[in-house]
Image (cartoon, rainbow, N blue to C red):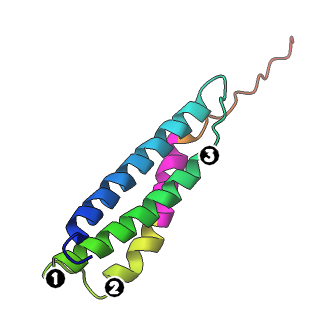
Amino acid sequence: MQEYAAYYGTACLILSMYLLFKGVTAAIRQRSEDHSTTLVPAYVYGILASVALTYALGLLRMKFPGWELPWWGNRIIFPGTTMLFPGIIYLVGRRPPIRQIDRVDV
């Protein structure tokens, strides 16, 4: 496992970025005029991307021992990215507010 840690870590890092991109595109698709639905909600992609990124950083740390985060770094990566990635998807996918018509002659 030690000799393949860099390969698995790189694959998980690429998978994480793919899942984040897939979540953003699903959010954009849901934001469109026809409000097309997707099979998997967009926020799930953000959570899966967070899990893949955490696993990738753990594998890459195992392969490169000199490349380490501060003591608080490992404890903040998963909760931080679990809030950050769905937050990015939310900001991309939120719909503009519906305009209210305030006309007296309607």
Label 3 secondary element: loop
Image quadrant for the C terminus? top right
Main secondary structure of the magenta stretch: helix
Q: Which residue is mark 3?
A: 40
Please determine whether, in this image, residue 62 is positioned above or below residue 33: below
Q: Which residue is mark 1?
A: 65
Marked residue nearer the N-terminal end (1 or 2): 1
Range of magenta residues = 82-92
Residue at left offset 64%, top offset 41%: 39
Please determine whether, in this image, residue 11 is positioned above or below residue 65: above
The percent coordinates of residue 86 (x first, y second) are 52, 55
Q: Is residue 18 left or right of residue 99?
A: left
Hey, which residue is sitting farthest top in the picture? 105
Check disc 3 and give the amino acid type. Val
Q: Is residue 16 magenta?
A: no
Residue at left offset 46%, top offset 42%: 22
Between label 2 and label 3, give the one nearer the viewer: 3
The percent coordinates of residue 70 (x first, y second) are 25, 84
The percent coordinates of residue 6 (x first, y second) are 21, 67
The percent coordinates of residue 92 (x first, y second) are 49, 41
Tags 1 and 3 touching, CB below 8 Å: no
Between label 1 and label 2, give the one nearer the viewer: 1
Q: Is residue 17 left or right of residue 99?
A: left
Q: Is residue 89 magenta?
A: yes
Q: Of residues 2 and 25, which is closer to you in this image?
A: 2
